[in-house]
Image (cartoon, rainbow, N blue to C red):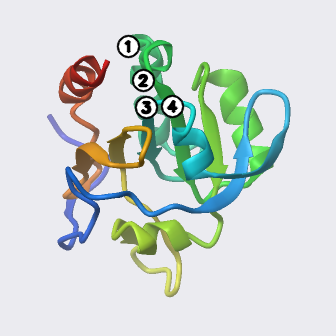
Amino acid sequence: MELDFEVVSLPASDHPTEGETAPDFTRPLVNDEYWEDASLSAVTDEGPTLLVFHPMDGAFPTTYIWNEIDDRGFAEDVRVVGVSVSSPYEHKSLLKERADGAGLFSDPAADLATEYGIENPLDGMTGVTEHRPAAFLLDESRTVQYAWVAEEWPAFPEYDEIEAAIADLA
């Protein structure tokens, strides 16, 4: 099969791993009605949380990631929140089309990509970075129960593994 894009290996990441505590942060959290600043710790205080980093809204990997999360119904079992460089306005559009039951953090400067060690510097765009696809299943204390980070571009989470980790946490 011939691809319309080149698969690119990404540099090694220094992301949180199982057993570590995920860094806390506060960013605008968008839902289907409004957005407000919220911390990750406030989200995880409500229960186990699947934290999904993805490219900007509208990018084909983002569409595939959220379609699969929706199809599998992850938001029925755990809190699901995404993070990307997209603005709250763009997140509202994504939430109208997919990401049922999810919230989306807005991180336009990609500071969380650096904090989580999952930067994806875009080729040919000096100083422009976005989040590489990544998924972290967190318990109520933000302890990482499962972690997956893309090692190449494009790449997609191991949804069966996420599903199993969610079942183990429940």
Point out the tag, 1 or 3, that comes first from the N-terminus: 3
Give the label, 1 or 3, closer to the camera. 3
Q: Amino acid at mark 2?
A: Ile
Q: Amino acid at mark 4?
A: Val
Q: Is residue 31 left or right of residue 60?
A: right
Q: Position of residue 122 (x, y in %)?
A: 43, 72
Distance between mark 4 and mark 1 Cα atoms: 12 Å
Q: Secondary structure at mark 2?
A: helix
The furthest residue to the left: 1
Image: 85 above or below 136: below
Distance between mark 1 and mark 3 Cα atoms: 17 Å
Label placed on residue 80 = 4
Point out the tag, 2 or 4, that comes first from the N-terminus: 2
Distance between mark 2 and mark 1 Cα atoms: 5 Å
Check contact, mark 2 vs mark 4: CB within 8 A: yes
Q: Secondary structure at mark 4?
A: strand
Q: Position of residue 73 (x, y in %)?
A: 44, 12
The furthest residue to the bottom: 126
Q: Is residue 130 left or right of residue 22?
A: right
- Which residue position is annotated with label 1? 72
Check contact, mark 2 vs mark 1: CB within 8 A: yes
Distance between mark 2 and mark 4 Cα atoms: 9 Å
Instruction: Residue at 41%, 41% (x, y): give it.
Output: 61
Distance between mark 4 and mark 3 Cα atoms: 9 Å
- Which residue position is annotated with label 2? 69
Give the label, 2 or 4, closer to the camera. 4
Q: For mark 3, does the 10 Å Cα neighbourhood hold few (<14), some (14 to 19), or many (20 or more) residues?
A: many
Label placed on residue 48 = 3
